[in-house]
Image (cartoon, rainbow, N blue to C red):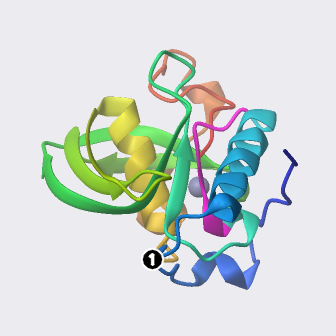
Amino acid sequence: MALLRLRKDEDPILRKTSRPVTVFDKKLRTLAEDMIETMHAEFGLGLAAVQVGKLRRMLTYDLYDDTGPGVLINPELISSEGTCDGVEGCLSVTETRGYVERPQKLVIKAHDLDGNEVTIEAEDLFARVLCHEMDHMDGILFIDKMSRIYVPEENEEDEEFENGEEA
Ligand SMILES: [Zn+2]
């Protein structure tokens, strides 16, 4: 396992579209392990492959409860329900956090590391993290969608996405 270098801010790769994964081999598994290690080292809730310089449609997540860590490959949104406003940060965007509206609930179809099709249902924070990471695959950052900047001093009671949690 190895820590990967995080791409940040003005790095042009963050604006590129990632390609679907077609080969499910040992190299892919190693990338997934390294992404999880990198995400954990930064206390991130999620990480898209493009954030470590790999233009592959692949993400890792960990909500630090019993749902993770996990890996989703070639994720596709199948359906979504409701909306939910919350604060987001990003391991690739230094300093800024902001409010972004996301679906409250969603269903995603994806592949696992063996290439098997999986269906994931997610709600609230998990749904938010998955949307955030899927946007990365299309070169979209949360700052493109945020309605306003989050100022921690003004929002001490806000527990939606605690200070320090980034994806
Ligand atoms: Zn991010």
Q: Magenta segment: does it hold 44?
A: yes
Q: Residue at x 70, y 57 (%)?
A: 31
Q: Which residue is mark 1?
A: 20
Seen in the picture, residue 48 relative to 149 is either above or below; the reply is below
Q: Residue at x 71, y 42 (%)?
A: 39
Where does the image place residue 62, in percent across and percent down from the top left?
A: 55, 32
**View quadrant of ligand 1:** bottom right
Where does the image place residue 134, in percent across and percent down from the top left?
A: 42, 61
Q: Residue at x 45, y 43 (%)?
A: 129
**Which amino acid is tagged 1?**
Pro
Give the side of residue 135 with respect to residue 91, left or right: left
Seen in the picture, residue 113 relative to 22 is either above or below; the reply is above
Magenta residues (range):
43-50
- Is residue 63 or residue 83 the one in the foreground? 63
Q: Quadrant of residue 44?
A: top right
Give the side of residue 66 with respect to residue 11, left or right: left
- Is residue 141 or residue 121 the one in the foreground? 121
Give the side of residue 105 with respect to residue 28, left or right: left
Where does the image place residue 92, in percent across and percent down from the top left?
A: 70, 59
Is residue 100 visible to us here? yes
Q: Quadrant of residue 55?
A: bottom right
Q: Residue at x 48, y 69 (%)?
A: 144
Report whether the residue tagged 1 is closer than 8 Å to ligand 1.
no
Counting labels gives 1
